[in-house]
Amino acid sequence: MVAAAQFGGLRDNHSLLGEKNKLLVANRGEIPIRIFRSAHELSMRTVAIYSHQDKLSMHRLKADESYVIGREGEYTPVGAYLAIDEIIDIAKKHGVDFIHPGYGFLSENAEFAAKVIDAGITWIGPPPEVINSVGDKVSARNLAAKANVPTVPGTPGPIETVEEAKNFVKEYGYPVIIKAAFGGGGRGMRVVREGDDIVDAFNRAKSEAVTAFGNGTCFIERFLDKPKHIEVQLLADNYGNVVHLFERDCSVQRRHQKVVEVAPAKTLPIEVRNAILTDAVRLAKEAGYQNAGTAEFLVDNQNRHYFIEINPRIQVEHTITEEITGIDIVAAQVQIAAGASLEQLGLLQDRIVTRGFAIQCRITTEDPSKNFQPDTGRLEVYRSSGGNGVRLDGGNAFAGAIISPHYDSMLVKCTCTGSTYEIVRRKMLRALIEFRIRGVKTNIPFLLTLLMHPVFINGDYWTTFIDDTPQLFKMVSSQNRAQKLLQYLADLSVNGSSIKGQIGVPKLTTNPNIPLLHNREGDVIDVINTTPPSGWRQVLLEKGPEEFAKQIRKFDGTLIMDTTWRDAHQSLLATRVRTHDLVTIAPTTAHALAGAFALECWGGATFDVAMRFLHEDPWERLRKLRKLVPNIPFQMLLRGANGVAYSSLPDNAIDHFVKQAKENGVDIFRVFDALNDLEQLKVGVDAVKKAGGVVEATICYSGDMLQPGKKYNLDYYLEISEKVVKMGTHILGIKDMAGTMKPAAAKLLIGSLRAKYPELPIHVHSHDSAGTAVTSMATCALVGADIVDVATNSMSGMTSQGSINALLASLDGEINTNIDARHVRELDAYWAEMRLLYSCFEADLKGPDPEVYEHEIPGGQLTNLLFQAQQLGLGEQWTETKRAYREANHLLGDIVKVTPTSKVVGDLAQFMVSNKLNSDDVRRLANSLDFPDSVMDFFEGLIGQPYGGFPEPLRSDVLRNKRRKLTSRPGLELSPFDLEKIKEDLESRFGDINECDVASYNMYPKVYEDFQKMKERFGDLSVLPTKNFLAPPVIGEEIEVTIEKGKTLIMKLQAVGDLNKDTGTREVYFELNGELRKIPVVDKSQKVEAVSKPKADVNNPLHVGAPMAGVVVEVKVHKGSLVKKGQPIAVLSAMKMEMVISATAEGQVKEVFVKDSENVEASDLLITLENPEAEAK
């Protein structure tokens, strides 16, 4: 409260009103605060009243005294402010001299005014008899007739029955509007057009009027299409003098609720303005009006004006009139009520002028993207606007305020003033952007879109402009980035990391160092400000794919491709290396590896893992890296007809995906099929050709080709390579996933291919599982391979690729690799720290595993399979799992083992170990076992056709009658995706969507949806340093996060609160850029019994949920009721507004979960439907 004891003397010494100077405001929220400010300037003492639900409201604290209305539970939250006798008793008990009603509630209630006067208290407003003569719309029409002022055709008096409404429509036609006679603020209004249900509209308007104003009287009039709503601010003293303070344009409305107001009206012709102002003053004089009021008019598209009503109170938008005239309307109200004349106040018409323009925006806690659904909860953050020409009038607008469902959703009024309309519009945009409001949704994004619309810029808006302009709802919402990141860190503080596969926390607790590169003279290279040397990408961009391949082949030596950014960390660190750490080292890499053939950085498992486990966008990773590394080609792994998914997709989905990949930065596409199925492979190859990328059609190498009787021998590879080359490829790839290509096999295979295809570049990929990769790759180079794959030293070995420095040393003096070994060593210092940073994902492999020649488990799968075995409790049976893998491979027909076929073998192996089965058991029991889905998919033919065909009778026994037997490419049976429809659906659910989002969804629908949910909850997590992404913050630790260029957040954990045993939550306290933030987090380790209603499934049309928090006014159906789609089934009241809830589908009511007068939260399940006929079909 205001420190009355400290400042009371000041007011007493400067009182303008004598001893009787105590004022009570019979209202809540913003308007009491506004009135208190003027009262304090008049040296008055102030009194607030409040409901029990409003005990923490700001208006109570802004007054000198405040008193609660009634006993707890005696009144409803709204009813407390309508309790006439109780309010007057409070005023009398505490020596109040004046009562100001504000707006809404009792402000237009003549009975209240009369009782205030009878109690000997001065009423600030028109007398009761004047309120009666102008305060309801029916009386106002009679007044207009006396004053000879035009009105819209309507009923001469209130209507009591629906039949009267129907008769009016019969005479004047549609459209019509039903209005509450004692209403305002859009309450109790219903527009009825031809074909609408006039009975329901009448009943709803009447019911809403009773709820909001305590009086259900309604009238009906003709509804004007696209009119302007112009109102005139009036002031009248007690001696018959009336002045106007010019007009306001209040046309920008929604649900008849004003949203943005402008003064003066920008496009109103001067003669129309003058006529309206003259009529407004004439009406006030005819009525014997006193104090402040507003005459409201509609102006049609022919500039004819019609009087609507006089509002006998202060208006929400009075602020803009104050700003353009310099007149304090509230102070004038008080002084007029105390007996001052307009002349004494200096308010003579010829002295009242306007200066410039003013715009007011009502900032509300409503979500425009959900049909302005009111939002409730705690204001976690409130940072307001300010500066030159910005005025704020707020109520409960402060951090920590609780936004209640019981009252109006307005949070603060923002009023801007300037010399021209355009200056003010731009000032308002600036002011709105400055607001930071977190914890509840607001309409600020909508207001910004509205202010930038051409209609608003020109000032040509009309009363239904918002409803008639759907593009206004294509908004750019605040990203709320800081609060979302704090939410993640808070959850991490309470519950620890939720990243799958993480064991413990990183061993590296400091930020990694970025190593320095030195030139030949020993000087440090400025990798940030110096353009990296030209590389092979410049050749590709200048010459195109065909010539690029020729230049690669002509190179005198063997080039290297670095797999550190993809396959290396997939093999060693479960694919968990994040964009943040790749971006950090990218500029250094662009210089250190400028001579490399390519960086393998995208596709394969990195694509879905980025979304699934790292909660980041793989496309954004690609774009960021491409920008930082403009000189080295990027290569991705493409699974033929699968794209980057694990099963076949329609061909148009593959074409679409590859097109996006090429446009966003991929240069070279290593295309393979897990079974070397050429039909599947061709889908990917053709897609790359269409996109204009470099095709590297790849043959998967499987097992040890030197073993006698091996299925995949030299003849097989030469035969299949011939078909691949005929298919058309720029580069021929050989992909040894398990690392089983011995040096002798490398010499034989690569030497034979080089002899067969002397002009074609050959690229070899292997893993170091057996410890022989460096020797094998050196052998490949010596016998003619153009490119071999390696990884940086600290990310090499075991299931990864061979060491780059080891290979360079092996070839030194014999073969040129175009790489500076010194730069490679300097670069590796960073990755040595990365191994510590990602230590919590290490597979804990101790060294090479030459047994790979027997079990043939691919490198990446080896670490994953070990992890999965441990998760399934089979860790102690790892040796048995490897034996089962070998048996499973032979059961399946000795297939090529690359993702996804390697997963089939792995799943079958784990299935065998879990069920203690050997290969004979599987064959014998095949027709009775329930095999894993991946095994069923393989035998059905969904992955493709294996070389040599499927093993029989095992295939028939496994499939039984559960699955068909495909004999052709799976994609041929798939209908093309409707890409436009998919995009429209994603836009309706997730907002701003691009073609890359569509491509992600096509590959992994569920993963993409879950990623979007995580992004909505936590924002862009890729900006967090990895140690803070994986490990809980330490109290007092300062975390710096750059969210975009020039914007850095400084966050510091201050404390984690005690457990709230009722809710199972803890409060986590942070400093954000020096400001305290409090984040509530559910402690998942605690079990709390909470009673909550089931939630509606938004994707299930048979679920009907509450669109917002509120009170159920009426349930219109019961269990067993038959309903049609769109039929009203319940009525909900929230924020003093009623909403009809309609059936979302045709059917029968299966269950009703609520009853009349019951409180509900947003999305609570109200009713479930069933459709027996549809279910039967």
Image (cartoon, rainbow, N blue to C red):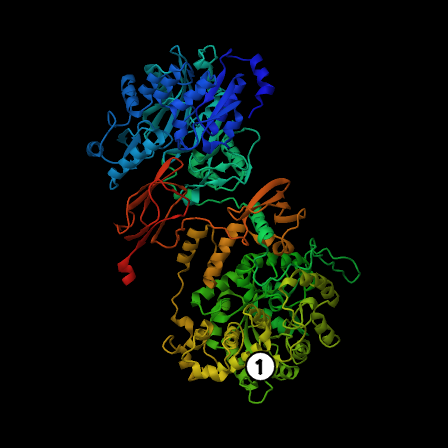
Secondary structure of the residue carrying numbered label 1: loop
Q: Which residue is nearer to you in this view: 599 or 28? A: 28
The answer to whether any part of residue 268 appears in the image is no
Locate the C terminus by quadrant: bottom left
Residue 687 x, y percent position in the rendering: 48, 68
Query: Residue at the spot x=42%, y=73% of the render?
Result: 970
Q: Is residue 247 above or below residue 860?
A: above
Residue sitting at the far right: 521
The residue drawn where x is 56% and y is 68% is 871
Marker count (numbered): 1
The image position of residue 1044, as x and y in percent, is: 60, 48
- Whether residue 862 is visible, yes or no, is yes
Q: Position of residue 1077 (x, y in %)?
A: 59, 42
Residue 457, horizontal then vertical, whole percent = 45, 35
Question: Residue 15's quadrant in the figure?
Answer: top right
- 1162 left or right of 1061? left
Q: Which residue is mark 1?
A: 703
Residue 79, quarter of the rendered image: top left
User: 559 or 173, which lies in front?
Assistant: 173
Residue 898 lies, with reference to residue 116, above or below; the image says below
Q: From the viewer's perspective, is residue 983 above or below residue 644? A: above
Picture layout, residue 124 above or below residue 910: above
Q: Quadrant of the N terminus?
A: top right
Question: Looking at the image, which residue is at 41% across and 20% down?
Answer: 88
User: How many C-alpha atoms fall within 10 Å of the one at disc 1: few (<14), some, or many (≥20)?
Assistant: many
Three-letter amino acid code at the position of disc 1? Gly
- Front-most of residues 588 and 696: 588
Residue furthest out toward the bottom: 708
